[in-house]
Image: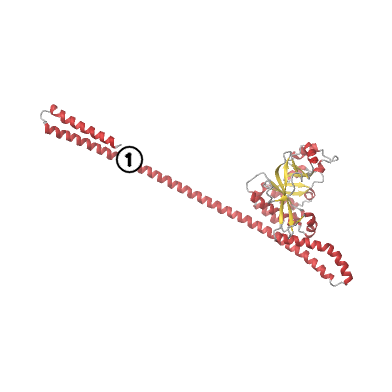
């Protein structure tokens, strides 16, 4: 209530008191001027008293309401603080679990990479030691024979030793790079996946291509190590990619040597099982020849990965007479066929029926080694959905900014 309202109410009491003092002598003859004034004063004081009691009661109720409102605000603040505390505890637990999981992943990767490096060091060391021993044997032969034999051995062994030495130091110096080649949708040529390749650099940063070291790597047992190192390079790219482009997948070739490596393959399976979230990103690729030679143990291990969401691809297909139902049941979802094989007029399956045949078993057909415009025109005539080849892009370093990552 405002001050003006109180003044008006007080004036009302004064008017009532004056009215009583004026009217009372006419009503009661015994009450004269002084008594009338006293009566008017009593009425005025009584009105003020009633008004004071009203103000006190109103103030008390207002104070009570204010205290209740303050108490409610206090309770709301307490509830908010409790909710914030619970959220902070939950967030702290999530951060702790995320850190623990990340540390576990890093430790697992380090264990695998350490195994790879130890294999490389051991196998490279043995090869270099054999080369040194051969040279030592030469010292005990006659000079004429030594020169002739030395020339023969140098022509081959020096080259092999140099390549092994380059591979050895490249791994120690982190000079094994990941290259990615796009797999595109047709006819838009939009990049949908990537295939991963490894490239080795020497101390002068000259790239050593697989054709230069692959045969030697197979003979020395290093090819499995390099294949698996490629896989973990690919995993690093996936981790950097994070949640961006969730449909983008990476094809990683796994050789027979890797699958039959009793030391590494079980460790690899365990690592994939612990990191099954990678199943949405990684596609393991095997040649048709290797798929036909998979042992029962390899089949069971790959089936375990398949049940955890991992999918496989078959490439280097030489014969289109494939048991597609069996392939699909083994968690294969992609098949890569050379463009020349599709365009072969003598093929058992006509190109018009090829896509539908594979699709019937939930297999995506990717036409690879498309290198000319004429080839792509012929491939599009058969309605193919996916393609890969130098026409769409050569393999580029994974850190290349031109990659659509």
Extreme residue in the front direction:
204
Quadrant housing residue 127? bottom right
**On the picture, is 298 further left or further right than 71?**
right
- Whole-percent x, y for residue 344 in the image: 84, 41
- Whole-percent x, y for residue 242 in the image: 63, 48
Q: Is residue 133 above or below residue 27?
A: below
Q: Is residue 74 visible?
A: yes
Q: Is residue 261 visible?
A: no
Q: Residue at x 15, y 29 (%)?
A: 24
- Whole-percent x, y for residue 25 in the image: 13, 29
What is the tally of numbered marks visible in this picture?
A: 1
Along the line of sight, the residue nearer the viewer: 181 or 103: 181
Q: Residue at x 80, y 40 (%)?
A: 374
- Whole-percent x, y for residue 398 in the image: 69, 51
Q: Is residue 157 above or below residue 390?
A: below
The residue indicated by pointer 1 is 62
Q: Secondary structure at mark 1?
A: helix
Quadrant housing residue 123? bottom right
Extreme residue in the top direction:
26
Along the line of sight, the residue nearer the viewer: 187 or 322: 187
Would you call the spot at circle 1 few (<14 residues within 10 Å), some (14-19), or many (20 or more)? few
Q: Quadrant of the N terminus?
A: top left
Look at the image and name its color scheme.
secondary structure
Q: Residue at x 76, y 40 (%)?
A: 358
């Amino acid at each position: 209530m405002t001050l003006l309202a109180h003044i008006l109410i007080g004036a009302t009491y004064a008017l009532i008191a004056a009215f009583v003092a004026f009217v009372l002598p006419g009503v009661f003859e015994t009450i004269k001027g002084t008594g009338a004034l006293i009566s008017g004063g009593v009425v005025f004081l009584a009105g003020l008293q009633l008004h004071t009691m009203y103000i006190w009661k109103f103030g008390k109720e207002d104070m009570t309401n204010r205290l209740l409102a303050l108490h409610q605000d206090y309770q709301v603040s307490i509830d908010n603080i409790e909710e914030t505390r619970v959220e902070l505890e939950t967030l702290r637990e999530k951060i702790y679990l995320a850190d623990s999981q990340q540390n576990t992943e890093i430790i697992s990767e380090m264990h695998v990479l350490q195994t790879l490096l130890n294999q490389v060091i051991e196998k490279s060391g043995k090869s270099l030691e054999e080369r040194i021993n051969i040279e030592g044997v030469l010292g005990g032969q006659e000079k004429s024979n030594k020169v002739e034999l030395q020339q023969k051995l140098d022509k081959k062994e020096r080259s092999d030793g140099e390549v092994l030495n380059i591979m050895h130091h490249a791994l120690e110096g982190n000079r094994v790079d990941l290259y990615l080649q796009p797999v595109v949708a047709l006819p838009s040529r939009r990049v949908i996946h990537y295939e991963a390749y490894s490239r080795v650099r020497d101390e002068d940063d000259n790239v050593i291509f697989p054709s230069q070291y692959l045969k030697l790597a197979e003979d020395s047992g290093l090819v499995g190590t390099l294949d698996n190192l490629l896989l973990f390079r690919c995993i690093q790219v996936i981790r950097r990619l994070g949640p961006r482009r969730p449909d983008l997948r990476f094809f990683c070739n796994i050789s027979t040597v890797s699958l039959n490596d009793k030391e590494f393959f079980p460790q690899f399976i365990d690592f994939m099982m612990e990191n099954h979230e990678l199943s949405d990103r990684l596609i393991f690729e095997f040649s048709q020849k290797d798929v036909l030679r998979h042992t029962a143990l390899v089949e069971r291990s790959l089936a375990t990965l398949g049940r955890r969401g991992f999918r496989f691809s078959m490439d280097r297909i030489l014969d289109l007479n494939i048991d597609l139902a069996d392939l699909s049941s083994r968690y294969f979802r992609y098949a890569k066929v050379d463009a020349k094989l599709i365009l072969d007029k003598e093929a058992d399956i006509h190109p018009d029926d090829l896509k539908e045949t594979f699709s019937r078993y939930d297999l995506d057909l990717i036409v690879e080694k498309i290198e000319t415009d004429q080839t792509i025109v012929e491939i599009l005539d058969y309605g193919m959905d996916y393609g890969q080849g130098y026409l769409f892009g050569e393999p580029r370093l994974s850190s290349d900014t031109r990659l659509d990552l």
